[in-house]
């Protein structure tokens, strides 16, 4: 422990030259750079061994952070260390660290232990770390881990980050439980940027809260032998979740700049991009997203038993614009969105899409997405007949004024329903479809009526029936007689005055039966129309 006002290290520490340089740099807030000037040998992720001239003990680093010497007059103390090999375990669990901390291009011999500690700002940039244990960590400012390689996972359970959490270009391998990043209950006041992240294992964000946006642009999440590569039920993002491509040219990642000195945005045309890729399942159930969930250019590589699960999510806009998953399922059951922005080529085929209870208001298709493909989209989501997806699609089309398309959707629903009916009901359904298309094309009834009227008129002109009572029948008129037979409700005082026999009797029966069938199907269609209104 240092004495008040005493800037020298305790004698029993026996500082090495590297540690003495770090100690002095801490007092005046400058950077202690232990690089040797050879890029290959200075790479913390390379194969070259680092000698004793670059080694600092973790206990000396912890002493500086927890109870360091006073700053030089007129300076602010800070730990800025570059190119160091930190031996043993850096353990500041439960400590309150006030100085600014930035460790760049460093190697850690053992894990970094930070549970329940409090920092102002902590930056570990381009470091090689066995593991980061930081459950319930609290920072007033940023926590940055860009371009680091972490060999056995990061734990940020219930951590609170005062501003931004930065994981850009970080490579994280799984721990013994198969998790790469364990961040359940994480709170980030502003942005969580994990762009071009490589995660090998399960990235868990259960119940996490992000104050602005969560960006995984260009990231690669791989957990092919586990159930999920991203497990984030009940995730809350106040703005947008980006699972999109990242631009590689003319971006902050193409230079030596380190975030937050730049952010990759959606790449412009002509820019070389790296897609977001998820190998394994993804779970975003019950998530709340204030602006949008964006899957543009995303690629999902799943096994048959894995899912992209969006059950009961709520967001103003869902942009489903990625590649079509070849295996696995996309689940939208119970999800509620306002705008659905999608492409026909993005949705999986039959059996790969479930959306029972999926509610949306406006369809915004990208590219060619005609009604025929939209009906295939609904059919793919309903291996067994369910009316809700058809009714939701029809309601959305009516909202945008496409009433004729809405009727086509409802007609497709009736045809799909007919497949589930018993034989007699199925035959009646075929008759309704063939005659007036279940009432959604009522003009067909008028056409059939005109055809039957013409046939009846011609037939009864050639074979007029005798009067029922001689001298009491009205003047013979085959036009009115045929029309009276066809109209089941209106009485033109013709059919009851004549007595057809033989073939004329059969012709009259056919006209009467056809009239009733047409009237019934038109009434059924009108009833459905009134119920829809």
Image (cartoon, grey):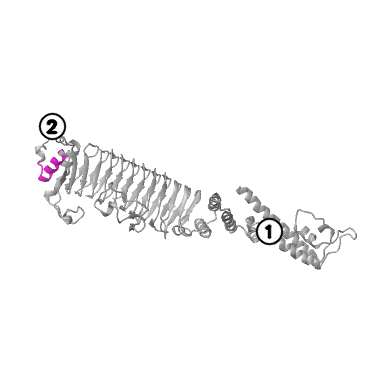
- Give 136 or 4, whichever is nearer the viewer: 4
State which quadrant residue 423 falls in.
Answer: bottom right
Q: Is residue 256 magenta?
A: no
Decide if residue 173 is on the left or right side of residue 108.
Answer: right
Residue 166 in sight: yes
- Give 431 or 450, whichever is nearer the viewer: 450
The disc placed on residue 5 is: 2
The disc placed on residue 445 is: 1
Residue drawn at the location 89% of the way across and 59% of the way down: 469
Q: Is residue 20 magenta?
A: yes
Quadrant, the N terminus: top left
Is 73 above or below relative to 520? above
Residue drawn at the location 65% of the way across and 51% of the way down: 526
Range of the magenta residues?
14-27
The image position of residue 103, as x and y in percent, is 21, 45
Is 113 above or below relative to 420? above
Tell me the mark number nearer the camera, choosing from 1 and 2.
1
Distance between mark 1 and mark 2 Cα atoms: 101 Å
The image position of residue 182, as x and y in percent, is 32, 46
């Amino acid at each position: 422990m240092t004495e008040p006002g005493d800037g020298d290290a305790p004698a029993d520490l026996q500082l090495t030259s590297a540690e003495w340089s770090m100690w002095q740099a801490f007092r005046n807030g400058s950077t202690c750079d232990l690089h040797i000037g050879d890029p290959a040998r200075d790479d913390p992720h390379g194969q070259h061994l680092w000698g004793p001239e670059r080694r600092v003990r973790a206990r000396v680093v912890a002493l500086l952070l927890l109870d360091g010497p006073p700053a030089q007059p007129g300076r602010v103390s800070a730990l800025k260390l570059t190119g160091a090999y930190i031996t043993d375990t850096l353990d500041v669990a439960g400590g309150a660290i006030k100085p600014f901390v930035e460790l760049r291009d460093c190697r850690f011999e053992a894990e970094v232990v930070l549970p329940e500690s409090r920092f102002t700002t902590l930056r570990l940039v381009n470091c090689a770390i066995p593991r980061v244990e930081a459950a319930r960590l609290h920072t007033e400012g940023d926590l940055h881990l860009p371009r680091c390689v972490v060999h056995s996972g990061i734990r940020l359970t219930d951590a609170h980050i005062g501003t931004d959490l930065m994981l850009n270009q970080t490579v994280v391998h799984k721990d013994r439980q198969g998790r790469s990043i364990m961040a359940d209950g994480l709170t980030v006041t502003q942005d969580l940027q994990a762009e071009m992240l490589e995660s090998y294992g399960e990235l868990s964000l259960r119940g996490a809260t992000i104050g602005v946006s969560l960006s995984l642009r260009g990231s690669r999440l791989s957990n092919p032998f586990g159930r999920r590569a991203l497990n984030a039920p009940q995730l809350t993002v106040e703005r947008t979740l980006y699972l999109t491509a990242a631009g590689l040219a003319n971006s902050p990642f193409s230079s030596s700049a380190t975030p937050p000195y730049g952010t990759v945005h959606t790449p412009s045309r002509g820019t070389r991009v790296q897609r977001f890729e998820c190998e394994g399942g993804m779970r975003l159930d019950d998530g709340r997203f204030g602006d949008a969930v964006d899957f543009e250019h995303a690629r999902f590589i799943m096994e048959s038993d894995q899912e992209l699960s969006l059950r009961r999510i709520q967001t103003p806009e869902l942009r489903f614009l990625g590649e079509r998953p070849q295996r696995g399922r996309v689940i939208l059951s119970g999800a509620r969105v306002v705008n659905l922005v999608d492409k026909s080529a993005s949705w999986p085929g039959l059996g790969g899409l479930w959306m029972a209870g999926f509610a949306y208001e406006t369809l915004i298709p990208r590219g060619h997405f005609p009604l025929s493909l939209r009906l295939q989209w609904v059919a793919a989501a309903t291996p067994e007949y369910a009316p809700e997806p058809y009714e939701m699609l029809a309601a959305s089309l009516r909202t945008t004024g496409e009433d004729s398309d809405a009727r086509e959707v409802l007609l497709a629903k009736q045809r799909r329903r007919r497949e589930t009916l018993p034989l007699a009901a199925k035959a009646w359904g075929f008759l309704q479809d063939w005659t007036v298309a279940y009432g959604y094309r009522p003009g067909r009834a008028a056409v059939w009526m005109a055809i039957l009227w013409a046939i009846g008129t011609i037939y009864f002109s050639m074979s007029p029936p005798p009067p029922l009572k001689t001298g009491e029948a009205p003047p013979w008129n085959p036009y009115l007689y045929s029309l009276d037979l066809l109209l089941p409700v209106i009485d033109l005082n013709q059919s009851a005055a004549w007595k057809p026999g033989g073939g004329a009797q059969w012709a009259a029966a056919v006209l009467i039966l056809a009239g009733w069938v047409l009237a019934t199907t038109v009434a059924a269609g009108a009833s459905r129309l009134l119920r829809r209104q």
